[in-house]
Amino acid sequence: MLTFLVNKFRLQNNSESKTDRSERHYDGSLDGETIYEYFGNRVIRSHNVPDGHPVAIKFKTVGFSRESEADMMAYAHSQNLLAPAVWECRQLNSHQIAMVADFVPGNSLDKVWPTLDEQQRMSIREQLADYLKLFRSCTQPYIGRVNRQPTHNPYEGIETRFMGPFSPEAEFDEWCLSRIKNTSEKKKWRRKLAELRRNSQSKFVLTHGDLFPRNILVKEGKITGIVDWERSGFYPEYAEYALAACLYDYGGEGWWKPILMEALTPCIPERLEVQSLIYKRGY
């Protein structure tokens, strides 16, 4: 059994510091009410038998999940960023993993938004912007997940692949350039990226990577939780904005794009352009 406990990590925030020392082991059923199902991920609500504490259990397919997702969620929880507290991960069989975490009260923002008046919507916008500023205050000296683990590769669409870790930024830029197949384009961007680094080195900040309204929980006008950290990691500070601007597939949720982008800190046009270019593999 793969077991995750929050206190196994040396959680880092600008320096090696805070750790949540609480230890929890789930003693309850792996059956319950399905509260979320999307792209092969299923989340149920259940409870811990000894104390009745409500939990959310996320089931994922082996090969599409890594325990580092739980590491990232535990880190975010330790920084008071509305991420659920992680209890443990279990490998149930050869093809399925379950992650047990606190149940967060509230409804997803995509369901709540149509019921809100303009004042309530403005309040949600402001709350989200404040939390995203806190995300940017959580940094590491590398691109990756806590303890220098590989992180999700956001340039492959819905495919689950991993990359890194990278340090310094030039190493990540070179990896990005390797995705550009056109020789002249690659040469042009190698020169531009080197110039950008000389002028300003990016910080590597906590990035959620999947900030859709379905992953933001709201109750009585307050954001109560930010869930689904499977695409999270520490990325260059421009990454969250670039994802929202040119990488996300909003599908039927196009209404969300201007709201999210307003809450994020913009990045310079050159970084936005190269992020879009490598997502398309430079063809």
Image: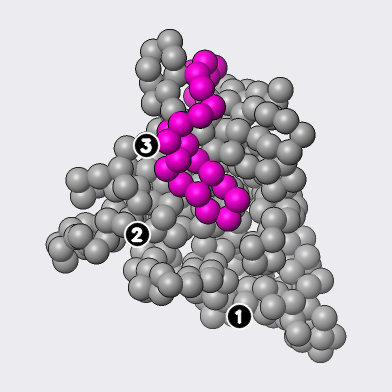
| Circle 2: residue type | Asp
For image coordinates 73% across by 38% down, the residue present is: 95
How far across and how far down the image is residue 196, in percent?
64, 73
Magenta highlight range: 18-45
Residue underneath mark 3 = 104
Name the one closer to the observer, 87 or 93.
93
The image quarter in which residue 97 lies: top right
Looking at the rendered structure, the secondary structure element under dot 3 is loop
Q: Amino acid at mark 3?
A: Val
Q: Quadrant of the C terminus?
A: bottom right
Q: CA distance from mark 3 to mark 1?
A: 37 Å
Per the image, the residue denoted by label 2 is 110
| Callout 2 touching callout 1 (CB < 8 Å) | no
Identify which amino acid the numbered label 1 is placed on.
Glu
Q: CA distance from mark 2 to mark 3?
A: 16 Å
| Residue 252 position (above or below residue 82) | below
Nearer-the-camera pick, 223 or 93: 93
